[in-house]
Amino acid sequence: MATLPELSLIETRVLGVLVEKQHTVPDTYPLTLLALTAGCNQKTSRDPVLNATEPEVQAAIDHLKTLTLVVESSGGRAMRYAHNVGRVLAVPAQAVALLAVLMLRGPQTIGELRINCDRLHRFADTSAVEAFLHELAARQSGALVALLSRQPGEREARWAHLLSGTPAVAASVRDEVGETGRDTPAPAGITALEARITHLADEVEALKATVAKLAAALGESAP
């Protein structure tokens, strides 16, 4: 595999969204530009939250197509896009899931990765997650992830993807003042609520796709 150029934040976000939606809303996958832009700007399960425009997302798609990381297909009245991450990077589905979550949510601990990957791939335990991360870090063709140095206030070190180059590690202001930093785990209720909101949003998208298909079959416009 040829060495990939460093990808921009929006390019990795596009790839992460395509991998995520392939699993969570298969009825709407491959995605249209509109759906992909909405996924990139999603407020839940994203770090950082973006406000990308359709032209910016289209430019990212066009570059990823030149690297064969994204493939285009015609479907209905709009072009649709799918990822080709596993084949281009020559990694298994489990590794694709981990990379996608790192691209969507930024650096995370092994425990966080196991929880956040659940809808893309259900790992048996944290040892399985760690094993795949070490494989990605030790690839002869080039590491795809790296274990970051543990920062002040963090209980565990975090892993990051390397598709955008080596990440700059700097403690946030909240980390510097103690346990209120980003590393402090959110209460279980909040984490569960966020997961539920994301799940409901995916279900709504799937229902929209079903309604659109039924409307098309009846020769009517979808509401």
Image: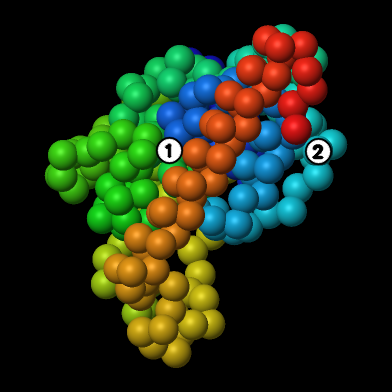
The reply, left or right, for residue 177 in relation to residue 210 is left
Please tell me how crowded label 2 is: few (under 14), some (14-19), or many (20+) other residues with Cα within 10 Å: some
Residue 197, placed above or below residue 161 = below
Q: Which residue is found at the position 27% from the left and 72% from the top?
A: 155
Q: Dot 1 corresponds to which residue?
A: 99
Label disc, if present, on residue 163 of the rendered structure: none
Q: Is residue 43 above or below residue 32?
A: below
Give the label, 2 or 1, closer to the camera. 2
Q: Residue 69's spot in the image, x, y percent?
A: 58, 21
Residue 218: x and y in percent read 71, 12
Q: Earlier in the sequence, mark 2 or mark 1?
A: 2
Q: Is residue 97 left or right of residue 166?
A: left
Q: The residue under label 1 is which amino acid type?
A: Leu
The image position of residue 94, as x and y in percent, is 31, 30
Residue under label 2, please give it.
54
Residue 201 makes an appearance in the image? yes
Q: Is residue 176 above or below residue 158?
A: below
Q: Residue furthest right?
A: 55
Whether 145 is drawn above or below 65: the answer is below
- Residue 197 in percent (x, y) is at 48, 54
Q: Mark 1: which secondary structure?
A: helix
Q: Are marks 2 and 1 in contact (CB under 8 Å)?
A: no
Amino acid type of disc 2? Glu
In this rendered view, identify the residue nearer to me: 66 or 49: 49
Dividing the picture into quadrants, the one containing residue 187 is: bottom left
